[in-house]
Image: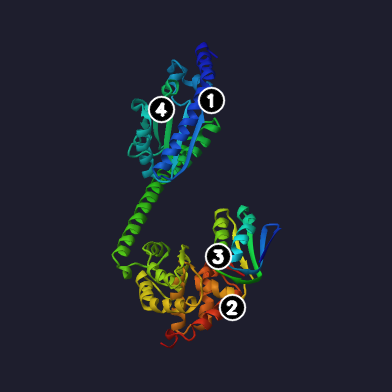
Amino acid sequence: MTTTITNNGNQIIAAFAGRLDTAAAVQTAEDIKPLLEVSGKEIILDCTELEYISSSGLRIFLTVRKDAAAHGCKVIVRNINADIRQVFVMTGFVSLFEIQ
Amino acid sequence: MDLHTEMILAEYDAKLPLVERLQKVVKSTLTDAIDRNGLVVTAVKTRLKTRDSLEGKLALKGNKYHSLSDITDILGARVITFYTDDVDRIAAMAEKLFDIDWENSVDKRRLHDTDSFGYNSLHYICRLPKSVIDDPELNDIRFELQLRTTLQHAWASINHDIGYKTGVEIPREYLRQINRLAGILEMADDEFSRIRTEITDYRRRVHQLVQNGQLSEVQLDGDTFSSYLKARPFDSLNRRIAAINQAEIQEVPLTNYLGVFKAFGCNTLGDIDQLKKRYAEDAYTLARHQLGNTDLDIISSSVGIQNICIVCILAQGGGKIGLIRLFNALNGENEQNSLLADLTYEQAKNLPFMSK
């Protein structure tokens, strides 16, 4: 599981690749810390290469969302696959994020 | 400049640092008390009379003042409220906060004859009591506190700009026109207060009806829907769904479902409650079918209401198109919504409510 963070003007993009399961969650929580420090930007959670997300992964996304709201940032989840889309619908997370 | 004026100006120069200290204490005392009392105001302002302004005042009415302490507006504080009722609330608050010099305080709102209109403000001459700050030098200085509404402030500011700034005496007909406006603004102030009171009464009535379960008597709008949600009508369903995987529930706002229920043709809160009663069991079945073979142990508090809406659409034959409209309403129009609808339809298509 890897997380790559890039700044792109008014956007900060976190690109996830691999399986965001309980085992990977500790390292990912560490990797996304730069997202928690931004304000006034659009945060893109790019899931193009993300294969799977567990509850631990959802909690990480939730942390980003809560922190972003406090800092006036918008969070967009981009390119989720069918399995992850299913997880978002089942848990009601679909109405928490803008999904593109 | 006469000797008397020079003496008072010298006293002003000497005491200025002290009055500046008083200014800070007065402003923070007022601001803290307003916050503590849960009052919302337009502004809390303080200003120190400038040396030039004091000199001008002394030139006009110097004989009236023996020393600087006779001039009560070297420090002026002003609280501008939204509503007339709040002027009285802030006044009551100020009476508890400060020592009021009643002899020199004046309620200009009460000074007008029944057939005259004009400047409306409540002026208190105050001192800081020892309970606020124990400093004999600060406790001794009087300052003026003006309380007025935003509209009274607007009128007073414009009147000051027109009447004083130009330095030219205004003809009577224009003065009459300005004062006429004060009457209109007084009416507007009263109307705003009345409307606020009526809205508060309305909310109280709605809250009562919701509490009593008389939901069919409450028209559906943003305000009433918020009241309904405060009663947490979907908690029981959410808890059942959470129990499937012993999941934690993350609280999220549900107000974005108002448009969905309106699109369903709900006109009252009772209509929503009917939908809830009718489809809650099927919404739970859908959740159990979706979550039962996963280890997902986190859900959002929107899952119950979301599933009720999904079931309502599918049970009434709305199909994938209906689901796309639902996701469009909740998430904004987006290509992903079509995929979400396909997926949800596939998950639900064999469940019992589809064949009802």
What residue is pinned by disc 1?
Answer: B53
Q: Quadrant of the C terminus of chain B?
A: bottom left
How far from the left and from the top, in percent, is residue B283? 43, 77
Disc 1/disc 4 C-alpha distance (Å): 24 Å
How far from the left and from the top, in percent, is residue B137? 44, 20
Q: How is the image coloured?
A: rainbow
What residue is pinned by disc 3?
Answer: A56
SS state under label 1: helix
Q: Amino acid at mark 1?
A: Ser
Q: Nearer the viewer, residue A28 or B263?
A: A28
What residue is pinned by disc 4?
Answer: B128
Disc 2/disc 4 C-alpha distance (Å): 67 Å
Q: Residues within 10 Å of mark 3 (few under 14, many from 20)?
A: many
- Extreme front residue here? A23
- Extreme left residue here? B212
SS state under label 4: loop
